[in-house]
Image (cartoon, rainbow, N blue to C red):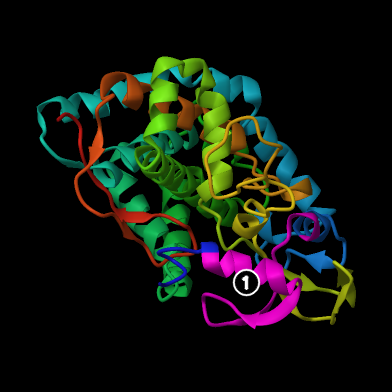
Amino acid sequence: MSFFADPAPYFDNWRERGPALIEGPDGQETWMIARYDDVVQALNHPGLSSAFIPGGMLNHTDPPEHTQLRKPVARAFSTRRMEALRPRIQQITNELLDAWDTEEEVDVIDTFAYPLPITVICELLGVPESDRNEVRALARDLLTLETATEAFGRFVVYVQRLLETKEPGDDVITELRDEPNLVQNLVLLITAGHETTVHLIGNGLLALLRDPVMKQRLIEDPLLIPDAVDELLRLDGPLATGLIRVATTDVIIGGVEIPRSSQVTVSLGAANRDPSRYSDPDVLQLGRDPHVAFGHGIHYCVGARLARIEAEIAFGTLLRRFPELVLAAEPEWRESFIRGLASFRVRPKP
């Protein structure tokens, strides 16, 4: 079975080997870091650089540049601002699920998991509603192995055009308009601001449908849903392969020396299923220790609060309105940098 359909055997192999030079899922030679403690060490190591792609994108910079770029973005995604979005996120969720009431079968990805976060991030940033299909296509191509480089160029052209034509408003683009590297960082914010949440919702709902005991428990006690969101992120988060780094000097991780100039892959998915940290790691279990699905250290996901809020509302509303929701067909997984479903058909009602 391919990595994209079931990464768990790959995670097991990577952790067993420890830090080792392997061929990654994308066919590139890389040092794979997969054990939880090693992943945390790697994500905090100053000798492992994120700045392996030029251009000043937030997730591809190191301090002090990263610190300067992150501050205004973090302010724009403050907890207070994200919490204030709850009523609008609930409204969007309700409207999308209203369409399920009359359907015998729906695709979760196309009718709910995509439209919810892309609407939220576009409204927050100030991307016009008329551009959302274009933005979705650009983000999809950017995260597909074969089209990533070409799609990035098209995405940059789109953002440049957006900045030239957009009127100022009460939105994040207006707030960040004078910040450096805005074009590249808007590509990041638009893409990461919805693609990861799409597949948090998709992967998480699939996990719940495959665990009817946990599903029923959340139906009976919705106050458990925030804890469940974190467990669903741990079990099958969208950043399964993980994050790329480059060694700027000889680096020792987990007792193994990684030579200078080596590419390093830090597998968040493998760390989140490390049996040395989590008992029965392939099982949904509430109340576990913190995970690294949003990263760790200075590059911890700036949109983590928003993603959690969207997921809490999405799962809570889905389970309340469609408690008898069941799979209609075996889902299909994407081949992408993001761990997620291409197709996920369900029957809302029996």
Circle 1 packing at 10 Å, graded few (<14), some (14-19), many (20+), is: few
Residue 62 seen by the camera: yes
Given the image, on which type of amino acid does mark 1 rest? Answer: Asn
Magenta stretch?
9-38
Q: What residue lies at 20% left-to-right and 23% top-to-bottom?
A: 98
- Residue 283 placement (x, y as % from top left): 53, 44
Q: Is residue 86 left or right of residue 231?
A: left
Q: Is residue 333 left or right of residue 270?
A: left
Q: What residue lies at 51% left-to-right and 54% top-to-bottom?
A: 187
Q: Is 328 situated above or below 257?
A: above
Q: What residue lies at 19% left-to-right and 45% top-to-bottom?
A: 328
Count of marks placed on residues: 1
Residue 332 position by quadrant: bottom left
- Residue 229 placement (x, y as % from top left): 52, 33
Q: Nearer the viewer, residue 302 or 243?
A: 243
Assess whether residue 33 is covered by the magenta stretch.
yes
Q: Is residue 40 left or right of residue 337?
A: right
Q: What residue lies at 86% left-to-right and 60% top-to-bottom?
A: 45
- Residue 314 placement (x, y as % from top left): 39, 29
Secondary structure beneath dot 1 equals helix
Residue 220 position by quadrant: top left
Residue 89 position by quadrant: top left
The quadrant of the image that shows the C terminus is top left
Q: Is 269 situated above or below 197?
A: below
* Location of mark 1 (residue): 13
Q: Is 144 situated above or below 90?
A: below
Assess whether residue 11 is covered by the magenta stretch.
yes
Q: Nearer the viewer, residue 187 or 237?
A: 237
Residue 169 seen by the camera: no
Q: Nearer the viewer, residue 82 or 227?
A: 227
The quadrant of the image that shows the N terminus is bottom left
